[in-house]
Amino acid sequence: MNDSMLPSGAWPVLEPGWVWLCGAGPGDPGLLTLHALNALRQADVVIYDALVSEEILSWAPKAEHVYAGKRGGKPSAKQRDISLHLVELARAGKRVLRLKGGDPFVFGRGGEEAQTLIQHGVPFRIIPGISAGIGGLAYAGIPVTHRDVNQSVTFVTGHDQSGETPGSLNWRAIAEGAQVLVIYMGMKHARRIAEALMDAGRPAEEPAAVVCNATTPNQQVLETTLGRLADDIDSSGLEPPAILCIGRSVLMRQVLDWQALAAGESPRNLDPLGRGLPAETL
Ligand code: SAH
């Protein structure tokens, strides 16, 4: 790839001493934004997280690549080191690209890193990315909103800072109020989350899906129900990173699994919600 891969236009310049906090999307390099690509072309150093692919890094051939991955739920001491490292590099006059999976402000601690930069007088720019809870579900054929299913969507993290199910969350209120739930980092506590939701009245038959390694060649999707979710995760052997989705929009995968369609499969059910086809109900 060369610089001309960017369409002509007035692309921002990554100046020495600046940090650009950038989302890399959920995995597929094609889901990078053009601003992210522009950043990769200019960076002296790329500080990247666990879920950023080799291929994306290869688009910054002249930059030093520094791994700053963290495993979910570890204490936040290391977060401080990462933030301060960004400050040091900027002060040394580097063009710094902080590359994070998905979107930097969606369960990505981008806000904390930016705060540290402000505190130390380091100028920065934020480049949003496609979050796994939206783009990852789309690659599984699950629309995060669908007019016949939901007029709202609730994004939840399955871990708090200590690695436990977030105690600060009111699971009863979530169960009562969330039409469709999209859960990040939910694999470890899937059983507890599912039980909390069912205790609060969500039906065991409610459709649920697990999308692992979404948008990558290793993407795997499990379709199940809330009641079977934890057992099915255990027996499938699926591992994080994964997005859990709970709600009737999961049923739309029966017709919208575009990757299966591209591979020659027929839709399993043209009208999975039983509402008639869109052209008939317009
Ligand atoms: N900022 C990221 C989320 C970081 S938290 C974003 O906006 O997407 C890390 C969690 O994101 C993972 O535990 C998983 O729940 C989810 N995730 C990130 N990439 C994923 C992928 N390719 N497939 C499935 N889940 C993913």
Image (cartoon, grey):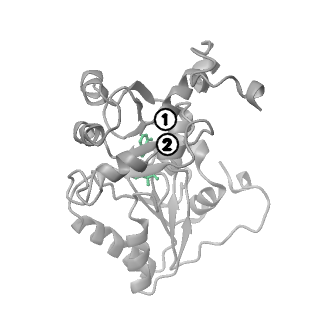
- Disc on res. 27: 2
Find residue 120 and report its horizontal and vertical position in percent: 40, 86
Q: Which secondary structure lies at badge 2? A: loop
Q: Quadrant of residue 112?
A: bottom left
Q: Nearer the viewer, residue 172 or 164?
A: 172
Q: Quadrant of residue 170?
A: bottom left
Name the quadrant of the C terminus: top right
Find residue 42 and report its horizontal and vertical position in percent: 59, 65
Q: Residue furthest right?
A: 8
Q: Nearer the viewer, residue 244 or 274?
A: 274
Q: Residues within 10 Å of mark 1 (few under 14, many from 20)?
A: some
Q: Residue drawn at (59%, 50%), measured in percent from left and top?
A: 32
Q: Residues within 10 Å of mark 2 (few under 14, many from 20)?
A: many
> Going by the image, does 38 lie left or right of 279?
left
Residue 36 higher or lower than 244, as above or below? below
Q: Is mark 2 within 8 Å of ligand 1?
A: yes
Three-letter amino acid code at the position of disc 1? Thr
Label 1: which residue? 216
Q: Residue drawn at (43%, 44%), measured in percent from left and top?
A: 182
* Callout 1 touching callout 2 (CB < 8 Å): yes
Q: Quadrant of residue 145?
A: top right
